[in-house]
Structures are given as C-alpha cells and as structure tokens.
Amino acid sequence: MFTNSKLAKSVKLACAFSAASAFSFSGAVQAQDEQSAETVEKIQVTGSRIQRTDIESPVSIASSDQSNSSFSTTAVGLNTTALRNLGESRTLVLVNGRRFVSGVSPSSGYAVDLNSIPASMIERIEILKSASSAIYGSDAVAGVVNIITRSDFEGVEVNVTSGISGESDREKNAINITAGNSWDSGSVTIAMGYDDDKGLKASDRDFSRYDQAVFLDENGDEYVDILNSSYPPQGRVGSYNADGTPYVGSENSFNRASFRQLVTPLERKYVAFNFTQELNDDVQYFAEANWNSSETYDSTIEPTPFNVEDVFKPSRGGTGGISMSNPMLPDLLVQNLMNDGLTMDDNIPWTVRRMVEFGARSTNMERDTVRIATGLDWNIDDNWALNTFVSWGKTDQWQENGGQVNLERAYQAFNVVEDPDTGEIVCADETARLYGCVPLNIWGEGTISEEAVRYVSTPAKATGEAEQFIFGATVVGETPLELPGGFVNVAVGVEHRLEKGQFQPGDFAQVGASSTNQADATDGSFYTNDVFVETSIPVLDNLILDAAARYADHEITGGDTTWNLGVEYSPIETLKLRASAATAIRTPNIADLFGGRGETFAGVSDPCSGITADSTGTVAENCLSIPEISARVARDGEFVLTQVESQSTGGTVGGNPDVNPETSDNWSVGAVWQVMDGLSLTVDYYDISIEDAISTTSRSTVVRRCFESTNFDPNCGGDVVRDANGALAEVHSGTSNENDIDTKGFDVEVAYTTELVGGQFGVNFIWNHTSEYVVTGIESGDAVDFAGEVLNPDDRANLNLSYGYEDWNFTWRMRYWASSVDSVEGNNYNFTNYAPLEEYNEFPSVIYHDVSASYAISDDMNISLVVRNAFDKEPPVANQSSVNGGTGINTVSEAYDVTGRYMQASFTARF
C-alpha cells in the first residue's frame, strides 16, 4: 500500500471508473496502486440503510494531495477526497456505513485523511453521488464515499511492492500482511503494514526547479522566466544589498524553489482489525479498530524571509528601528544612505534578508489516528432487525517547524554597542548577554554567527487533536403493507454525534514573538442529535419509490430538516429509468465556528485608493471623512498608495460562532440500459444548488462593504485600522455564509466485455461533462461561472482497455483532462505590466497513458508490473502568475501528474 495515498488513489479510481453496477476491488485492491486497473471490477453502491443494490455512475474528484499541501504547515501530507469539485468538507466519508474521525487540523477544516484507512482491508468502495443528508446526516451535500472493509478473510496474504520513477527517484516501498479466520459463528481479520514514499524536491524536475512567472517581451508576447525572491541571503536595504553594493535582482535574488517540496515524503504504519461473533441465533456482535501513524519528514520550504519591520512593528509591541549609528552597519551602506539624504540620527529603511544560516523552514508532522467502533445487530424476528453501534475516534497531530526566528531575542541582538574594554560589538543589555545574547549581523552574506543562530532561533512546536464520539440505533424491516411490487420496507433511527477539536500553535506563535505569523489557539466542541426515517415502496414490480427524512438538532446552529425522494422505473427488463430530488445541509465544523484567529498579510484592495477631492459617491464621501486621507488628498491631490503600503496590510482571519449551515437542493435524472449481453450504457444528469455556502470572507470584501455603507463607521466595527498616513494597517475577517453555488452536468458510461482470441476483452469508457459551476456572492449578487477552469474542466474522461488470457492480465488506461483556463475572471497577471494572462491562461488538453501486466505464478502467487504516465508527459505551466497553480510546484497537481513516468512492481503470496 502506497501513500499519495493508495486508498486516495483507489477512491479516485473508483469514482473515475464507477460503472453501471459500480466497482469492487478484487482481493481488497491486492495492495495495488491506482495504476492496477486490472484488479478493478465493480463497486456495489447501496446508498441506503435498507439492504439493496443500486446503480451509480462516475463523479468528479479534487482533493488535498502530497503536492498541493506541501506548502501548508497544518495540512502537509494529507490525502483527502471531494465529489463534484464541491470541496472535501461537503463529501461524507464512511467506513462500513459509519462516520470516520477527521484527520485535518481543527484549526483549518474537516475531512477524513485517507492515509488512515489501510487499502489492504478494503473489500469494496461504494460511491453515492447524490445528496444524502436525509440518510447519513450533515456533510453529504456532494455525496458519500463508503469504504467497506473485509470481514471474512481466510488465511494469510503478504504483499510486497516497490516503485521508482523514470528519473530514478521518488522511491516507494511497502509491505502489507493480512490474516484472517472464519468459523461457524464469526470471523476475524487483521491487517498491518508499513509504507514509505520518499517524495520529490522541486529541484528534482525541470518545470519546478526555479521560481517562475510570466513576463512580456518587447513585442508584448508572453514568456516564462525566472522570478526569484527579493529577500536575498546577503540582505537588502531598499535598492542596496545589505553590504552597501547595488542590488541587482537578476544577480542578487534568491531561488526559493531550491528548498521546496514537489511531493511531500510520507511514512506510514498501520494496524486494522475486524471481528464478528454470533452471541446466539438472533444477536451478532461486531468490533472494528484502526490505528494509523503517518509522518512527514524532511519536508522543507525556503529559509525564513526576515523583515526587520517585524521586530519593531507596533502591532507586535515593538518600537523604534535600526539606527544609522548601529556599529554593525557596513561603512559603504551608511555612506550610500547618507548620500540618499539620511542622517546619523535617522533609522535605516527596513532591511529584509533570507535567513539561510537558520536552515530551511522544515515541517516534521506526525498524525496518529485511532478509531474504534462496536455494536450489536439483533434480529427481532423474521422481518425486523435492530442495529446499534458506538464509535470513538481521535486524531492527534504533532508538528515541529524549524528555521524560525525569535523576534524578542532578535530585538536584543540588534541593540548593540562597542565594548569600551575590548572594542568588540556586544549586546547592550547585560541581562540578555547572560542568556547568551550576541549581535545578529544581517548586513551581508554569511555574516550571522553560529552563536547568534543559537540565541535567536526558536523551536516552533504545534499540537492538535480532533475527537469524535457517535452512538446510533436503527430499526429496519418489512411492514405488513403489501403492494403489487412487494412489501414496503422501513428504517427508523436515532444518532448522537459529538465533535471536539483543539489546536495549539505554540507559545511564541500565539504571542507573535516568532517570525511565523501570529496565531491564536483553537478550542471548541458541538453535538448533534438526529432522528431519521427511510422507506422503499415497491409500487409495481417495475416501479419503486424511495423516500427519506431526517431532523438534526445541532447544539450551535439549531434544527434542520432534510429529505430525499427517488423513483426507479423499468419499462422493459433491460432498461431502468431513475430520478431523484433531495435537500442536504453542511453544518459548520470546528474550524468554521471556533478557528483561532491567525495573522495574515495577503493583499487587500483599498476602496479609497485613487480618491481625489472631486470624487463623488458614498465610497468617496466615506474615505474623505477620514482626516488622514483627506489631508493626504489635500497635499498630493490624490490618495495614492506606495508599493510598501499596498503590500503591507496586516490583520487576522478566523472562525465565527455565528455562521449558519449551508443548505442545498439536488436533483438528477438518468437511465441504465443493458443494450445486449456484455454491453451496457449509463447516462445521468445532475443539478446541485447550494445556498449560504461557508467560506472565509475576503478582507478586500470586508473593507469594500464597510465603505459602501451609508451608515459609515471609520473603524468598521473594529475590523479596519488605518495608520497615521491613512493607509490600511490591519483588516480582520473570518468565516461566513458568503456564496451560493450551482453546478450542473452529466455522466456517461459505456461498458463492454467479450471473448477474444481465447481470452476476455473489456472496454470501460467514462465521461463527465460539467456544463455549469456558478458561484454567486450573496451580498453583491455577482455571479461567475467557473466551468472550464482547470479544476472544473468542461470534460474529463477515462478509457480502460483490459485483456485476460489464462494466467495473464493486461490493461491500458487513458486519462483525459480537457483543455481549460487558469482563470475565467482574468485575475491572474504577468509581471511586466500586471495585465491578465492570455497565452498562459490557456491549458492544453492532456491524455495520460498507464499500462500494466500481471501474471499468476500459481493459485496463491501473483506478480504485477505497472507503468504510470508511460510516455512521461510533463505538466502544463502554472507558476507565480497563475491563480490555480500550487505554491512552489509551478503546475496544478489536482489535474496533472508531477512525478513523470513511474514504474511499480508487486508480489503477492497467499497461504
């Protein structure tokens, strides 16, 4: 079982190839990667607490992976999944029909980390691609992924797998052992394993080796070139290197990509256990247990970009600056600054520097997930049964971030004097010297001493914990009411769920004494009590009506009711027509409600920018009512921000206890046609409308709304702070019900099997078309259709060809991602005149080819070889100019392969 994740890849493959009868993973995926399409047959889809088999078709997936999470300190190494591109928090992941604890930091979101569920335990994966809140509760807005684990395994199975890329890197190795036994009244299955993915550095691939951006040449044509950081290892003071020589960006800048991660390394250990036992003829006991430990290691990004302003920033309690008379300043720098008009009584302009002496900023993350579920299934009589369960789960997260700077100690290390006895430069504060203070000389390359690093560096530790407790009971059975199609079935149940979460960023981060952004702790909990009912009504032999309803009483947000209605009609034996309508909810999670406020310096648009004395309208009147702005307009004729002012707006974002649930209306219509023996066709159309979608309000939106108000408050209720020159100093925001989301599209699948030259030949073709993905701002009414953007392509498809002959099996899979754009709004830009991208806004269509072969040495032994991205196709460019490109990887990992050609061999033996 491989990370990136084996299960994540299995779920994605399941969704991509879910057939008109769905899919099951032969031999619990046989510890094979997503490349092993030959092991995929069908996934059974139930989507109900009433036992039956339904038919489903493909869905779309986007998720966190080891590339797009590599720049995050709290999400690094996660593998999560999302249906219909509606986000991981709107996709409910179950294990054996029951919720699984979140693996995401409670400060940043809620989702199941698929790394924590071992693929060697999987029997099949069920995909329900419609809203299912009435059946399964909150979060099932886009659908449900239900992972069914093995419960009756016999014997011992050992799988050893090893892989390597065509560039001889990204080694992956795994060993998985599954054992089990069954007896007349029960069974036990246990699996354990270890896997290690070495990952990739950005410098390991040409497309990610350098920081890049789009520029314009002399003819106005776009081209890609290196765009390094202006925080160099030698330091920079305005237009000078910190040693006083002229700063030349093309020569003196810093390549951040040399330290960045293309694929995060991930090591995993796990043990899983399933047990069933009949206590008597009518009562069966079951127990499930999972333990998983996932660790990211040697995951790095570039050394800290240090700004002296952070040390003296008033919002962090600092005062003053670096004086021109500071003895650490090089003579050449002082002379140049004096030539520019400064005097020895002034402070120098803010100095920035890449703190390479402190090493790369590293994130060593460990997540331990434990989950236990147990319960009783009681056959009350021949027609009725009672199912009860209790589950508890907890994810503990520990992380240690290296390369950080203690700002309080940096303040002492900048405050230096010459020792009158020795003439050496020492820290001015005698007490600080007792604690090891030595001068922090950042004016030149290699000028920071090891002693200064030891004194100023600080460990940055953080811990988090997500905990879940659930009790549920369901009575299910057949009523006495008989219709022409059979007896009416009913399920009635109750469920209590408690969610807790806390995250501690560390002492220095909480008080703003570290070079990382200041962050508050997260701590919160909520419970929900639900009651639900579901029924299946066989009106005729060929006509079935389904209905479900649920009332959920949430501790914070109150009560909500959801419902499902469905119909299936078979006018002839080989054709099934189906339609459904449903409502669903997503109640806010711990991060939405209680997420600790964290510091941010992302760009903010000031609505007062460009205001003149002649400007009219509500915004202009409100801006000119602020004395600092009106004084600047009177002096300069216009309120024009400097580059530093426009890029230096601080503030915070965080949770909001007043946020309300999302609600959605979903409907679909489709058909399944068994055209002939071996040939089937499935078509489904879907329409999903989400109201009051939860998101973090843009800080630009916060300011704009405030200044457009006719009941104007200059401080915007404390959310906006301006400095003495009228520029935005701080803007604060948080989660809220910001948008409505509407998406429509259809899925088509053709499945065909036939005998060919003595073997079995199969074709499976899946096509998803997204016709609309509109996000509408609730407050503004502005609507943008994101269909056609790279994460929402108009079309994507998979063609799987398979052939089995005697002991051999072969597959050839083609994955298609349609041509798309980086931004439909044009909010990307080149770095020459900052106009929206044109040529590099376009992404070409991409087809990846994966081939595999397996051979059964005997009934109990099998070997396989898989080659993924066989033609070694490089991904399209999506760099710093892009909106959807992953930070530091210069492409979009959700859509495109970043590893290149990859080969994997596997050996499985059963005893």
Image (tube, grey):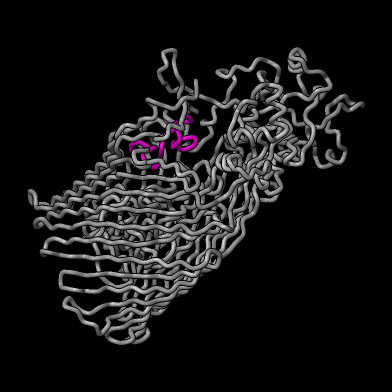
Q: Nearer the viewer, residue 443 or 175?
A: 443
Q: Nearer the viewer, residue 69 or 774?
A: 774
Specify the segment rendered in magenta. 879-901
Whole-percent x, y for residue 147 in the image = 36, 62
**In the rendered image, which quarter contains the C terminus?**
bottom left
Mark count: 0
**Residue drawn at 43 percent across, 54 percent down:** 691
Q: Is residue 808 left or right of residue 733?
A: left
Whole-percent x, y for residue 707 in the image = 60, 39
Q: Is residue 343 magenta?
A: no
Splitting the image into 4 quarters, where does residue 322 fall? top right
Q: Nearer the viewer, residue 126 or 160?
A: 126
Splitting the image into 4 quarters, where does residue 546 fall? bottom left
| Residue 39 shows up from this direction | no
Splitting the image into 4 quarters, where does residue 275 fall? bottom left
Q: Is residue 55 left or right of residue 397?
A: left
Indicate whether 602 appears above or below 459.
above
Q: Specify the farthest residue to the left.
A: 757
Whole-percent x, y for residue 116 in the image = 45, 58
**Residue drawn at 33 percent across, 35 percent down:** 820
| Residue 280 shows up from this direction | yes
Q: Is residue 118 left or right of residue 702?
A: left
Query: Chief secondary structure of the magenta span?
Result: loop
Whole-percent x, y for residue 763 in the image = 17, 48
Indicate whether 776 appears above or below 104.
above
Indicate whether 804 appears above or below 274.
above
Q: Nearer the viewer, residue 272 or 88?
A: 88
